[in-house]
Image: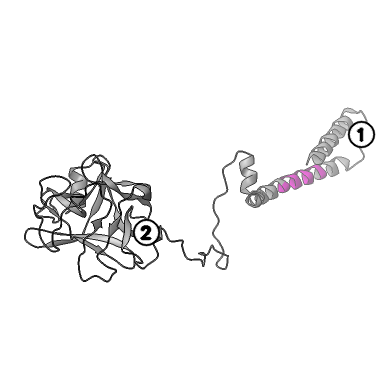
Amino acid sequence: MKSLLLFVSSFFSVVLALHSWDFPLPAGSENELLNFTQSLSERTLLGRAIAREVAPEVRIRETNADRLRRGLPPLPPTRRAPGALRPRASPLPPVPTVCRPAPGVTSTIGYIAACYPDGTLLGYIRTSYGRSDMYTHTPSTNEALIVSLPSLPPFSGAIDLRALNAADSVNSFVGAADGSNGGSFKPDILSWAFITGSNHVNANTPMQLVGNGRGFTESESQIWSLNPTTLQLTARWTNVDLSQLYPTPIFFNPDADGFYLTGDYAVFDRDIYEGQMLVDFVYVPVNGV
């Protein structure tokens, strides 16, 4: 392009010089010169138009790395052709974790992991209570509560979880003590119970005054069910009218530093919001850690 411009500039300089000389050009030379100049201008305009059409294709062929080096944003994503290769899932199975363990209960002795619904670990139930006399969590199994199952599954019904290393050895079952409206865990009612140590209360029985880690309030203990495939522990709370809420939502309240049961988590979250979060309890056999 620079060579062409230099040629045109030189050409017009010659034309002007010829006009400045005082002698006539041969007949027809001026018309030929005008025709040549017009043809040259048309070719120049045509070349510019073609360049404008080609430029987008050139830009598309450049890489995102080139654009980033020039301080430009990356190219927009392009749709793959129907036969284009797409990422495929690995044929290898996922690595088991405490929140998504391999199926099968291989030991009647284990820990309780508190897991977020997305499968990540919040922590293990700690052997000692938090500041509100409820079970809280720890990141290490060295400080985790060790519980025992009554036998290997399948179970005939709800089971007790007996704490083997609880700081509160008087109330050696993992249960829940009434906090508010414990006799009526139902939808649209604000109700909760504190997960803490308790003395034994039979399954399918409303809360009893048997003693628990929170003091002289009523509690329930034989409320747990264990899924032998997912190893998830779920609670079944029994109301005073013998109706039951299954599964009973479990959540962790960081302000109170403890785990709760509730009849309606949405109502609790609406009326008493303290940064709490729903969790799942998962049984972790001691040989699975």
In the rendered structure, which amino acid carries the disc numbered 2? Val
Residue 80 falls left or right of residue 51: left
Q: Which circle's residue, 2 or 1, is located before the other in the chain?
A: 1
**Residue sitting at 56 percent across and 43 percent down?**
73
Give the tally of numbered discs.
2
Check if residue 42 falls in the magenta segment: yes
Q: Which residue is mark 1?
A: 24
Q: Residues within 10 Å of mark 2 (few under 14, many from 20)?
A: some
Pinpoint residue 13: horizontal percent, then vertical percent.
Answer: 85, 32
**Residue sitting at 20 percent across and 65 percent down?**
158
Region rendered in magenta: 36-47
- Viewport quadrant of the N terminus: top right
Residue 187 falls left or right of residue 3: left
Q: How is the model colour-coded? A: one colour
Q: Are marks 2 and 1 in contact (CB under 8 Å)?
A: no
**Above or below: residue 167 compared with residue 15:** below
Pinpoint residue 174: horizontal percent, then vertical percent.
Answer: 22, 54
- Viewport quadrant of the C terminus: bottom left
Q: Which residue is mark 2?
A: 286
Magenta stretch: dominant SS? Answer: helix
Pinpoint residue 35: horizontal percent, then vertical percent.
Answer: 81, 45
